[in-house]
Amino acid sequence: MRTDVLDRLERFYDAVPRDAARVEEFDTLVLFVRDGAGWPFYARPRPGAPEAATLAEVTAVRERQRELGLPEAFEWVHEHQPSLLAVARSAGLTVLEAPLMLLEAERLPDPGTLSDVPMRVLDPDETGFAADIALRRAVAAVGFAHGGTARGDAGPAERDAALARLDVDALDEEAARVADGRRVSVLAGTPADGPLASGMAMRVGDVAEIAGVATLPSARRRGLGAAVTATLARELRAAGTDLVFLSAGSEDIARVYLRVGFRRVGTACIAEPAAVI
């Protein structure tokens, strides 16, 4: 990965949590602590740190996370701190090595060529915007609860049931971010079945990360994930975003994004304690 691209990604990763979290520094690591309710953040390497994180620093952050009642979670780009992978594993953490992919805009297809299901970019000025935000998150909740790309039984009924379990503060936060332009949210669905797939993107300046792309298991294998991603990427490009990236949860999922014009440029690492059997 080019150094200038890596530097831009690191600045983006550091900026995204800062408007909703306070920062605690541990030498080469930064722990983001959310103020108030909402999805908890993680620890990352500090931008510009002259040295790699050590086992002692990782251990200190984990102790602080436990003290605060936070998940013991770390995220980083392997190409930025390649030695952190071995350190995290020596600390007893399990590391997901997710394909890190950048958009090649000239290869971005028309979403209509990927799926015949209508795509809709959520607009804060439209009636029903708040309900649409809730539906986006409900689709994501069901999709990620049934990981992978295989078809399954969970569908609209499970999506509607998930609405009652959503975090109200998280809904309000997403609505505010869409309204001020820092987030783009998309729903895909039909009049008969309602929303079947969803996704969103986070923007900081001219850099954006596509995330949360999910399809109800009953609607998979219809090109919805690819079409949602293409819709988000087109909206971002139209808004002047010139660096669009994402992290794929697996090699199978990465193949979906290859169809949309993304190419792998590195590895995004996500570490957490190993599961107790």
Image (spheres, rainbow, N blue to C red):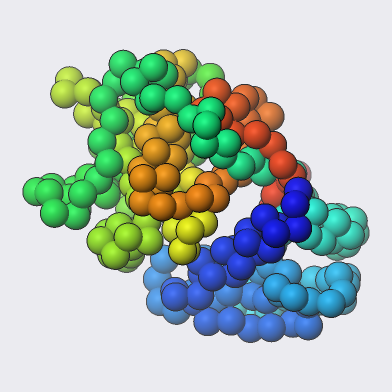
Decide which of 72, 24 is in the foreground and name it.
24
Q: Which residue is drawn at 75% across and 58% down?
A: 3
Q: Quadrant of residue 214?
A: top left
Q: Give x and y (percent) for residue 69.
A: 58, 73
Q: Give x and y (percent) for residue 110.
A: 39, 25
Q: In this view, does 205 lie above or below 66?
A: above
Q: Which residue is drawn at 39% across and 38% down?
A: 234
Decide which of 105, 232 is in the foreground and name it.
105
> Can residue 137 be seen in the rendering of this structure?
no
Q: Give x and y (percent) for residue 142.
A: 41, 36
**Farthest-out residue, left:** 127
Q: Is residue 15 above or below residue 78?
A: below
Q: Residue at x 22, y 29 (%)?
A: 194
Quadrant in which the C terminus appears: top right
**Count of marks placed on residues:** 0
Decide which of 141, 136 is in the foreground and name it.
136
- The reply, left or right, for residue 177 in relation to residue 22 is left
